Image (cartoon, rainbow, N blue to C red):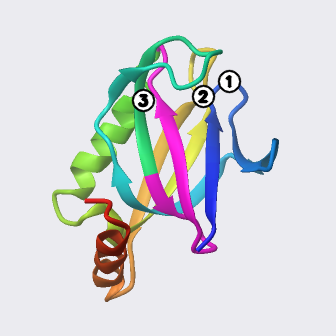
């Protein structure tokens, strides 16, 4: 299983895949299966960004690669959409039972906002993902 890192650039509205030391623009949407997510934490993971709240995601992309990404709150409370999506999904499912589409969409301000949509996966997806999460010790 390959490991990949993604970056969500809320300034230009694009999602980037890290390829070596380069960034490959993959557009403004990404379909994933979320295996794990943290609660928002106050930190500065990159020296060129101010301290703010961040959520770390571990997920599978559509190629089955194990991936990492960070979602940031910025000054626009961008993580609110993530927190609302998680709460809505967890009323009926676990995140790993859903195919989640993350998109960067235009907002009223200078930065793009996150948008989340999900559909439940095929029967058995949750069991397979639960085994994978256990084998990766993500709990």
For label 1, the SS is loop
Quarter of image, res 33 = bottom left
Q: Is residue 66 magenta?
A: yes
Q: Is residue 5 left or right of residue 20?
A: left
Measured as percent of width and height from the top left, residue 126 is found at 30, 78
Residue 115's place in the image compared with 35, above or below, is above
Residue wearing tag 1:
11
Contact (CB < 8 A) between labels 2 and 3?
no
How far apart in space, not on screen, are marks 2 and 3 (Cα)?
16 Å
Residue wearing tag 2:
112
Q: Is residue 15 left or right of residue 53?
A: right
Say which residue appears at 52% left-offset and 26% top-offset: 45
The quarter of the image holding the C terminus is bottom left
For label 2, the SS is loop
Sequence-wise, the earlier of marks 2 and 3 is 3
Residue wearing tag 3:
54
Say which residue appears at 33% left-offset and 27% top-offset: 41
Give the magenta range: 58-75
Measured as percent of width and height from the top left, residue 25 is found at 79, 46
Q: Is residue 115 left or right of residue 134?
A: right
Residue 95's place in the image compared with 47, above or below, is below
Q: Residue furthest left?
A: 91
How far apart in space, not on screen, are marks 2 and 1 (Cα)?
6 Å
Measured as percent of width and height from the top left, residue 12 is found at 73, 28
Mark 2 crowdedness (10 Å alpha carbons): few <14, some 14-19, many ≥20: many
The residue closer to the viewer here, 2 or 81, is: 2
For label 3, the SS is strand
The quarter of the image holding the N terminus is bottom right
Mark 1 crowdedness (10 Å alpha carbons): few <14, some 14-19, many ≥20: few
Contact (CB < 8 A) between labels 2 and 1?
yes
Say which residue appears at 25% left-offset and 64% top-offset: 94
Q: Is residue 134 magenta?
A: no
């Amino acid at each position: 299983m390959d490991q990949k890192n993604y970056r969500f650039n809320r300034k230009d509205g694009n999602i980037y895949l890290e390829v070596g030391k380069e960034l490959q623009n993959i557009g403004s949407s990404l379909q994933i299966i979320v295996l794990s997510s943290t609660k928002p934490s106050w930190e500065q993971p990159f020296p060129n960004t101010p301290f703010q709240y961040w959520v770390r995601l571990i997920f599978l992309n559509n190629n089955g690669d194990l991936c990492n990404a960070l979602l940031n709150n910025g000054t626009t409370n961008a993580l609110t959409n993530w927190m609302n999506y998680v709460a809505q999904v967890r009323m009926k499912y676990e995140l790993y039972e859903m195919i989640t589409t993350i998109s960067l969409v235009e907002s009223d301000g200078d930065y793009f906002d996150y948008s989340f949509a999900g559909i439940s996966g095929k029967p058995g997806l949750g069991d397979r993902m639960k085994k994978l999460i256990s084998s990766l010790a993500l709990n």
